[in-house]
Image: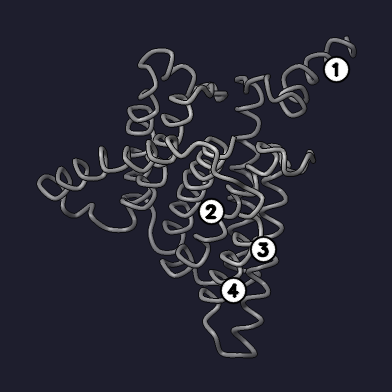
Amino acid sequence: MLDVVKAFLFEKFWLPIIDESVYYNPYNTAIYAILFGLIVIYILKPLVREKLDVEIDKKFVLGFTPFIVFGGVARALKDVNAFNTILLETPFIYGLLIITAVSMLVASKKIEEYRGIEYQKVLASMGLGALLLILPFFTLQEPKALATFLLTIPAWTLPGYLLLKAEKPELLSWEFTLPVTAHFLDATSTFTALTYGAEEKHVLGRIAINTLGNWGMFPLKAVVIIPVVLYIRENFNGEEKVFYLFIIIALGLGIATRNTMQTVSL
């Protein structure tokens, strides 16, 4: 019985970590999602708001944005063989990034306290500095892929903006547009990667793409992310609402960055 359990855990959890050719499965996807949710709700949110006494608002979100991009680029370091360490693999990369983010937040608050510089500006500068440090590890190998990514963005941003302006102008605020845009950038990065020979590894993504083709991530994001964002906007208030929207932004933008760097650099 024990051997069966060990074999199951190896096949479903450890093998996808050590072997890039093995895709995500429903088991590790569900466990990672549950663990991530528990960490966000019961550790990160209380830590940021209560222990560090940080106001979670629009400035908080914008201050962390360069770090989110850095996180996506850092995850791609292993994809382009710049570093070969398990710490850059899921789920370990998330732990590493959370520890780094909290450390940078603490440092930025200290600088604000002693120097009077707003912590959001310090935090954004730290994230940008970290990003600039690792960018030299990448070289542009697929300029056509980069062009595809950039040219695909107007295909959904312009119609989306016009639709919202005509039908739902109240949604033209950062609380809706930023999280939705982050995930549509993820869909764009996936479309670009698939166009240039990559394969989707995530369970829901594979189903959508196998059913609808390379564009499949766009309707998947529309039917999943938009209702979630609308639910959060309508059922949460203040800092709690902003925090959950921030997590959605981070997930979308981070994955979009990783996918794009991997595609254009291989």
How packed is label 1: few (under 14 Cα within 10 Å), some, or many (20 or more)?
A: few
**Residue that sits furthest to the left in the current view:** 166
Spatial separation of the CA atoms under disc 2 and disc 1:
36 Å
Q: Residue at x 66, y 69 (%)?
A: 51
**Residue located beneath label 3 in the image:** 102
Mark 2 and 1 residues: CB-CB less than 8 Å, in contact?
no
Amino acid found under the numbered disc labelled 4: Asp
- Of labels 1 and 4, earlier in sequence is 1
Image mark for residue 53: 4
* Front residue (pair 232, 203): 203
Q: Would residue 240 be found to the left or right of residue 14 on screen?
A: left
Q: Secondary structure at mark 3?
A: helix
Alpha-carbon distance for marks 2 and 3? Answer: 16 Å
Instruction: Check if mark 2's residue and mark 4's residue have beta carbons within 8 Å.
Output: no
Q: Please, what is the three-letter code of the amino acid marked with disc 1?
A: Lys
Secondary element under disc 1, as helix, strand or loop, is helix
Q: Which mark is residue 119?
A: none
Residue topped by disc 1: 6
Label 4: state its secondary structure. Answer: loop
- Whole-angstrom CA distance, mark 2 to mark 4, is 24 Å
Q: CA distance from mark 1 to mark 4?
A: 43 Å
120 relative to 155, above or below:
below
Three-letter residue code for mark 3: Val
Task: Say which mark, if any, is on residue 69.
Answer: 2
- Nearer the camera: disc 2 or disc 4: 2
Mark in the foreground, 3 or 4: 3
Foreground mark, 2 or 1? 2
x and y percent of residue 182 in the render?
41, 46
Q: Earlier in the sequence, mark 3 or mark 1?
A: 1
Which residue is located at x 42 percent, y 56 percent?
Answer: 241
Q: Position of residue 77 (x, y in %)?
A: 67, 44
